[in-house]
Amino acid sequence: MLTFVVVVILLALAFDYINGMHDSANAIATVVSTRVLSPRTALLMAASLNFIGALWSESVAKTMGKGIIDPKLITLTTVTAILVAAVVWNLITWYYGIPSSSSHALVGGIVGGGLAAAGTDCLQLDGIMKVVKGLFLSPVIGAVLGFSIMLGLMWTFRKVAPGKLNKGFKGAQLMSAGVMAFSHGMGDAKSPWASSPWRWSRAASWRAETSSIFLFGSSSSARARWLLEPRQVDGASSRPSGTR
């Protein structure tokens, strides 16, 4: 039994570690590609704010732990299957460069593992519908807000000189990147901890993701620079540094 518990803890750590591999470029992509921060400094900022975010809120962890399936009907074997499924899918999407949500991968594993172990009786439909709504609404709301904010910024600063605008948006980029890292920590860092009925050490989960950001962030930031490198027109960037 003890060996099984250790295996579950190691799998949860592996999930959080791979989550850091998966998402480390998200928060630092724009600040690195526009040279507002060096990759090393950006990684330090992202890792620190992910860790602080994990300490700040438990709302997502509570939904993952109690709101998807009934934890009373789940065994160690089920938790193992859940974590293996999420880890394997995360590795596949990371290898092929497919943007995907680690949290939704874990939710899918929880639903599938719960169905196999205890049938439909274990499902918490209210929690599952909350996740499904978030899955479909997130990209739509993001697109609408991104379009609206960008349109507002372009109209507001239409008469401002590009050089002056770039300096101001450097600070705005730092703030937006910091908020993204912080919110990622609040949402994702404790998800695998919540999936375990024994609520194993939270600190181990946070350390795993933070160390993963440090170790894998350099390759991720290089990929971010390649994807988001501003095009040069007559020796100057074709877009302000504050834009994504």
Image (cartoon, grey):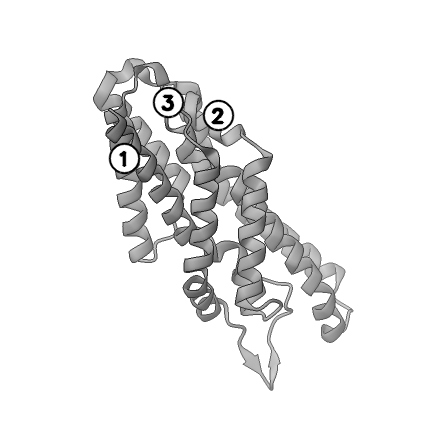
Percent across and percent down for residue 100 are 38, 47
- The numbered disc on residue 197 is 3
Can residue 141 be spotted in the picture? no
In this image, 96 relative to 46: left or right? left
Q: Pointer 3: residues within 10 angstroms few (<14), some, or many (20+)?
A: some
User: If you read the primary sequence from the N terminus, does the residue marked by circle 2 or circle 1 appear first?
Assistant: 1
Q: Which residue is mark 2?
A: 62
* Above/below status of 217 relative to 56: below
Percent across and percent down for residue 237 are 60, 77
Residue 105 figure quarter: top left
Can residue 241 be spotted in the picture? yes
Location of the C terminus by quadrant is bottom right
Q: CA distance from mark 3 to mark 2?
A: 11 Å
* Above/below status of 215 relative to 81: below
Q: How many marks?
A: 3
Verify CB contact (< 8 Å) between mark 2 and mark 1. Answer: no
User: If you read the primary sequence from the N terminus, does the residue marked by circle 1 or circle 3 appear first?
Assistant: 1
Percent across and percent down for residue 231 are 53, 76
Q: CA distance from mark 1 to mark 3?
A: 14 Å
Q: Secondary structure at mark 3?
A: loop
Location of the N terminus by quadrant is top left
